[in-house]
Image (tube, grey):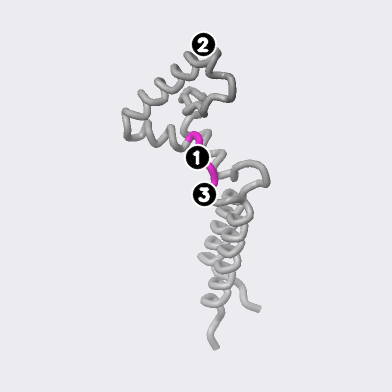
Amino acid sequence: MWQPNNAQWWLLVIVALFIVAAWPSDADKSLALKVTNWAVDPNDELPILPGPFAAGQGDDLDAVEAHDLQTRMYDELYDKGGWTRMRLELKVATDPFNPSTERQVLTGIGVLTAFLVWRFGARKN
């Protein structure tokens, strides 16, 4: 029976770990994105861009001032550019596809990798 060599085993392990990290849950982000979101702002110090006002919230002066302050803080950091801008974007990054599509792509990557390792690793007689 054919057995993968050392390099092929490592390839299979790396692809399997990638699939586990990138696999999205039903209602949340993938493990890789959760780690990325945390890594760029571990102390939760960076502001996020606030969403639009809810209906009737525009009449509350304190809510408007808090919203404007948070927007100004975000814009000041965003205008610095470079790594700071990248951190602001990565803090709120989400998975690129919806979960079902992402699962199909990851399953395809896993199956294709296993097939290629088996196909090109088989001993030729």
Label 3 is placed on what type of residue?
Pro
Q: In the picture shown, does residue 12 fall above or below 119?
A: above
Number of numbered callouts drawn: 3
Q: Nearer the viewer, residue 3 or 86?
A: 86
Check disc 1 and give the amino acid type: Ala
Q: Quadrant of the N terminus?
A: bottom right
Q: Position of residue 101 (x, y in %)?
A: 59, 57
**Residue denoted by label 1:** 93
Q: Residue at x 41, y 25 (%)?
A: 74
Q: Which residue is mark 2?
A: 61
The magenta span reads 91-95
Indicate the quadrant where residue 110 lies: bottom right
Cα distance between the residues tagged 1 and 2: 31 Å
Secondary structure beneath dot 2 equals: helix
Q: Earlier in the sequence, mark 3 or mark 2?
A: 2
Disc 3 designates what residue?
96
Picture coordinates of residue 113 (x, y %)?
Answer: 55, 67
Does the magenta run of residues contain 119? no
User: Image quarter for residue 5?
Assistant: bottom right
Q: Tell me the crowding category of disc 2: few under 14, some 14 to 19, or many 20 or more residues within 10 angstroms, Cα based.
A: few
Residue located at (37% from left, 31% from top): 84
Which numbered disc covers residue 117? none
* Comparing labels 1 and 2, the label whose residue is closer to the camera: 2
Viewer-nearest of labels 3 and 2?
Answer: 2
Q: Are marks 3 and 2 in contact (CB under 8 Å)?
A: no
Who comes first in sequence, dot 1 or dot 2?
2
Distance CA(mark 1)–CA(mark 3): 9 Å
| Residue 93 is inside the magenta segment | yes
Q: Secondary structure at mark 1?
A: loop
| Amino acid type, label 2 | Leu
| Residue that appears at 55% across and 13% down | 60
> Are the residues at dot 1 and dot 2 in contact (C-beta closer than 8 Å)?
no
